[in-house]
Every structure is written in C-alpha cells, then in structure tokens.
Amino acid sequence: MKALVESAQATKTASEVTALLDTETKNRALESMADALTDNAESIVAANAKDMERGRANGTPEPMLDRLMLTADRIAGIAAGVRQVAALPDPVGEIMNEWTTAEGLNIKKVRVPMGVIGMIYEARPNVTVDAASLAFKAGSAILLRGSASAYESNAELVRVLRAALEKQGVTPDAVCLVEDPGHDAVDRMLKLRGLVDLIIPRGGASLIRNAVLNATVPVIETGTGNCHVYIDETADYDMAERIVINAKTQRTGVCNAMETLLVQEDWAKQHLERLLKTMTKKNVELHGDEAAGSYCPGVIPATEDDWANEYLRLAMAVGVVPDVRAAVSHINRYGTRHTECIVTETPENAAYFQKAVDAAVVNVNASTRFTDGFMFGFGAELGISTQKLHARGPMGLREITSYKYLVTGDGQTRA
C-alpha cells in the first residue's frame, strides 16, 4: 500500500508531464481509457460485487447501494462519457484575452492546467472515471480519495485507467488512488499544500463542511442542494405540474432535486389542492405551513428545519407566499445557493427572480434537474460549485483550469 504522501508526490510529478501533452495525445489516451473500461467490464463488476456484498451486510440503504452498483451497461455508459470528454475542445492554451499596452507590450491571458486536483467523494464509482477523464483532458493529474465502501470498485477502475495510460506511453501517475482507507487520510490530504493544488469535495454536507473548515489547500465547495421551485401567480398549471413532478420525483437522491415548493397565494387558491393531491399520489411526503396544510389533508406541519432540509427522498416542504419578492426572500434565507426555479408567464417577475436570487443556477420555466455538467454540454462534471470564487455551477473542463499572463516585449524597461 502506497503512503498518502508518496501517492501525492507521484501525482505532482505526473502533473508536470500532463501539462505539456498535446490535444491529440490526450484524446488518444482517453479513447484508450474508454476501450479499457468496456474490455475489463467483467473484472470491474466482480470488484464492485465485493463492495455491494459488504454494503448489504452493513445495512446500507437501497438508494445508496444503487449509487454504488456497477453493471456492464453502466460501465458502457461511463466509457461513453469518457469518449464525450475526448470529443470536447481542449481548454489548455486557449487565449482568453489579448491586448497591447501603451508601452508596446503584448499581453495574453491564457488558460493553463490546474496542476494536481485532489478529489474526495462518496460511494459513486462513476465519479472516479468522470473526475479522472476531465482532469486529464484539462492537463492536470488527479489524486482520488473515494469512500471505503467503494474501495474495491475504485481500485479496479483506477488500475484499468492507469494501464490504458501506460499503453499509450503516458505516465500512469496522472491518475492516482489514495490507498489508505482510514478516515484520517482525508484530513491529511486536506493539508497537502505544495503537493495538491486544489481540493474538490463531492458528497454529503459533513464531508463538504470538513473540507471547507479544515483544508489548507484551496477548496472549491460543491454544495448540498436545498433547491426550490416557486410557482408565480401567472403560471400555467400544466407546465407547473410537469416541472414540480420532474424536479421532485424523477430522481430523489441527487443535489439538483427540488426540496421546497413555494406557491403564490392567488395561484394556490385555484390550483394548489390539485397539485398536492397529485404529489401525494406519487407517494411524496408533504411538510407545509398552515396555508399549504389547508389545501391537502395529511400535510405535516413544517418546522424551521424542514425549510432548510435536503430530504433526498420522496418528501418536500411546501409554503404559500404573497408574491415573488417573498419567494426570493425565503429562498435566499434557506437555500444552499445551488439551483432555483420560477414558473411564470410574467417576464418582469422572471427577470426579478433571476436577478435577485443568490444561486449558481437560476431557471425560468425549467426543472431544477437540468443543473448537470452533461445537460449543460460539458460532457461530465466534477461537481456543482455553490461558491462564488473561481468556479460556480457545474464544473466542466474550463472550470478546472487556471490561467496565466504571457507578456512579450522587444526590450521595454519601466521608467
């Protein structure tokens, strides 16, 4: 078993190589990685079966087991994602801006690799491949620390990816796995300043909070998702119902699912009873304020915690508000700055909502479920950033690069 620092040092050395790779070499290596995943599907599924067996023995809930599970079809989908990354434009070397100063200096702002990206994540083995492929295409090396519950799966996936890189003459240390399964390995990884350039935590609130509060390495905070849908007074009922059903029930255990529904009071008088009955028929547990409770029997009185809750299951909070300004005030108080939605036919209210809501993504008449790197055309993502510095929203290739200024003169000196 490699020690953490040894793995980090190997990744650091590899990052100096990956930064210089041309686009053709990176794409060829990514295609090789995709081929290797499908060619080794049997061994990957076998390794995953060990994690699944241990998870069942430990009483892991079924939704978490579903996240953990790998099948031949899922592996084929993961491999297709790698090919999509290969097909994306290479961000490295992109000239973001260029100008000439009064002194005759030519200045270019150029996109460059981040260096070493440290990824800390929970029991989703697909993240192992998504993160590795994105980091590699962006010219960086990656140090992966998945959860102990997915260790066998992650170890086999990394073995396959490293072999594919080596086959193409690329240093396999561009993809390294933290082999120490102990919890203290995470805390030590957060302090590898000088070896790791960026930490991206992806998982539950406690994992993210630990990284933000304890890291000495810069962190991009990927947030939990207390996402809201606000139905404005002019909203079309059929559109609102479609969006609410999709945002809440299409997939519950994800960060871009709706957790709170806010409804304008006049619209509520006409339509909320029908909408809430539709949601109860879909087995959604309702927690609501007094006004919401008056439209549907069985609504559980909402507590302060309910408004801030990321349920990640068939449950949601429901509140009735007087207008769009009250909705925005509620969202900015309880939201997690992830994704918020307004359903409306009033352009002025839509514009106010998009301007006033403090979130990475603000939708008009579209489900919160669209906040996703793939849906945004990024191929894949390393997570959804809910902070304001450097990157915000789905993090694709450009969001995991940095930049530098290239200054060219012909002998100028400063007076």
Image (cartoon, helix red, strand yellow):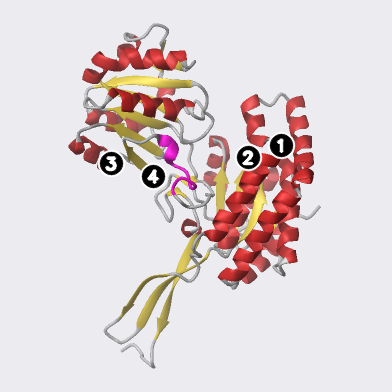
Name the amino acid, label 3. Gln
- In this rendering, the answer to whether 2 lies above or below 41 is below
Q: Which residue is drawn at 26% across and 40% down?
A: 356
* Residue at image mark 2: 122
For the residues marked 2 and 4, what is the alpha-carbon distance in whole angstroms? 22 Å
Q: Do the residues labelled 2 and 4 touch (CB within 8 Å)?
A: no
Q: In which quarter of the image is residue 358?
A: top left
The disc label shown at residue 354, or none: 3
Query: Which one is in front, 217 or 225?
Result: 225
Q: Where is residue 264 in the image (x, y as percent from the top left)?
A: 25, 23
Q: Position of residue 26 (x, y in %)?
A: 61, 66
* Residue at image mark 1: 149
Name the amino acid, label 4. Ala
Q: Position of residue 242 (x, y in %)?
A: 38, 27
- Frontmost of labels 2 and 3 is 3
Among the two numbered marks 4 and 3 on one chain, the one whose residue lies closer to the N terminus: 3
Q: Can residue 118 be seen in this view?
A: no
For the residues marked 2 and 1, what is the alpha-carbon distance in whole angstroms? 8 Å
Q: Quadrant of residue 106?
A: bottom left
Among the two numbered marks 2 and 4 on one chain, the one whose residue lies closer to the N terminus: 2
Query: Which one is in front, 229 or 201?
Result: 229
* Residue at image mark 4: 360
Q: Residue at x 34, y 39 (%)?
A: 363
The residue range painted magenta reads 368-376
For the residues marked 1 and 3, what is the alpha-carbon distance in whole angstroms? 40 Å
Among the two numbered marks 1 and 3 on one chain, the one whose residue lies closer to the N terminus: 1
Q: Position of residue 124 (x, y in %)?
A: 63, 40
Q: Can residue 171 be seen in this view?
A: yes
Q: Which residue is drawn at 24% across and 14% down?
A: 269
Among the two numbered marks 2 and 3 on one chain, the one whose residue lies closer to the N terminus: 2
